[in-house]
Image: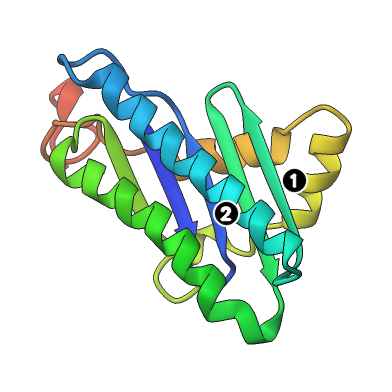
Amino acid sequence: MINVFYWPRDQRLVMTGHAEHKGNYSPVVCGAASALFYALCTTSNGFLKYKWLKGRYHLDEKGMAYCKMWPKKRYFKRTRVAIGMCVGGLMMLADKYPHLVRVEVLNAWNHESIGNFDDRTVLEEAAQGGVTYLRKFCYDMLKGRPLQGQKGNKNEKAGNET
């Protein structure tokens, strides 16, 4: 399953996972999600060329993608539209293929358990050749959740109802 985490105010996008083979559309969905992410990366490179951004960072590793933009104040809305278009496309994929894609829009007020995401740590570890903070974040966000397509709580598989 492709899991997408998006922070609109911070202009940050984290994608993890792959579309498993659960039907005929898995490779197409995985390709579409990748194309949306690469389009966002190319767009942010254009923003940097025209000096709309103070900086941007992309990380693309097997099964993990990360994009963060630091726009100049006067271009914030324009750059947010670009990342919003990418997330909008991913949401359309999630609507059509809920067993393959899940999108979460995160803010401090709607998801208190994540705390503050530390971009500096991600950048430092990526420069050193590791992405442990980012992988731990994705693991923490996904642990304890019921399997996709399963109703009820996480203990229902074992037959224990709470």
Give the position of the N terminus as an image quadrant: top left
Q: Residue furthest right?
A: 128
* Residue identified by numbered label 2: 43
For residue 142, what is the image quadrant?
Answer: top left
Q: Distance between the Cα atoms at labels 1 and 2?
A: 21 Å
Q: Position of residue 105 (x, y in %)?
A: 39, 61
- Look at the numbered disc 2 and give the secondary structure of its residue: helix
**Which label is found at residue 55?**
none
User: Disc count in the image?
Assistant: 2
Give the position of the C terminus as an image quadrant: top left
* Residue identified by numbered label 1: 122
Name the residue: 65% across, 40% down: 134
Is residue 27 among what the camera can see?
yes
Q: Nearer the viewer, residue 162 or 90?
A: 90
Name the residue: 25% across, 13% down: 21
Query: Please, what is the three-letter code of the amino acid marked with disc 2?
Result: Thr
For residue 110, what is the image quadrant?
Answer: bottom left
Name the residue: 63% across, 56% down: 44
Q: Position of residue 10 (x, y in %)?
A: 59, 69
Q: Nearer the viewer, residue 162 or 74?
A: 74
Q: Nearer the viewer, residue 22 or 69?
A: 69
Name the residue: 45% across, 33% down: 34
Left or right side of 96 for 127: right
Q: Nearer the viewer, residue 148 or 122?
A: 122
Q: How busy is the neighbourhood of tag 2: few (under 14 within 10 Å), some, or many (20 plus)?
A: some
Query: Please, what is the three-letter code of the amino acid marked with disc 1?
Result: Val
- Look at the numbered disc 1 and give the secondary structure of its residue: helix
